[in-house]
Image (spheres, grey):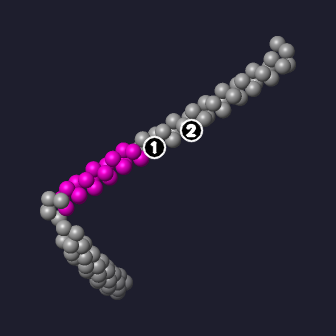
Amino acid sequence: MSNSEGSEKGRERDGFKALDKAVGRTLEELNVFRQRALDAGGRSAELEALLMSFESGEETLGSMKQRLARMEEENRDLRLRVAHGRETVERMLARIDFVEVQK
């Protein structure tokens, strides 16, 4: 085998490696696009169901806004209660530690 034949086979091998990498990247991108399409289909179905509930009169924009505002207020209230509960527990733990030290 001459030197030119060896370098030609080397270039051919390099070309196949590059082609293999390109095909691999293309397949990865295809999988990403498939997943995006599936996700979009799911979101589309959710939006269609929401639209149907609006059209049927089951839910109005005003009632959704009221419900959202009520839920946000409840969330704020619950966060405050949890914070107060933590403070109470911390005070109780401090008292327990004090009593244990006094023993």
The label number, if any, that marks residue 25 in the structure image: 2
Question: For residue 47: magenta?
Answer: yes
| Residue 21 in view (yes/no) | yes
Highlighted range, magenta: 36-54
Specify few, some or many for label 2: CA neighbours under 10 Å numbering under 14, 14-19, or 20 or more.
few
Residue 73 sits in quarter: bottom left
Percent x, y of residue 5: 80, 17
Residue 39 lies left or right of residue 68; in this view the side is right
Q: Which SS class for mark 1? A: helix
Give amino acid for label 2. Answer: Arg
Q: Residue at x 25, y 76 (%)?
A: 69
The label number, if any, that marks residue 86 in the structure image: none
Question: For residue 56: magenta?
Answer: no
Look at mark 1 in the image and give the residue it sits on: 33
Residue 2 lies left or right of residue 103; in this view the side is right
N-terminal-most mark, 2 or 1: 2
Q: Which SS class for mark 2? A: helix
Percent x, y of residue 26: 54, 37
Percent x, y of residue 2: 85, 15
Above-or-below relation of 21 to 91: above
Above-or-below relation of 46 to 34: below
Main secondary structure along the magenta-highlighted residues: helix
Q: Residue at x 56, y 38 (%)?
A: 25
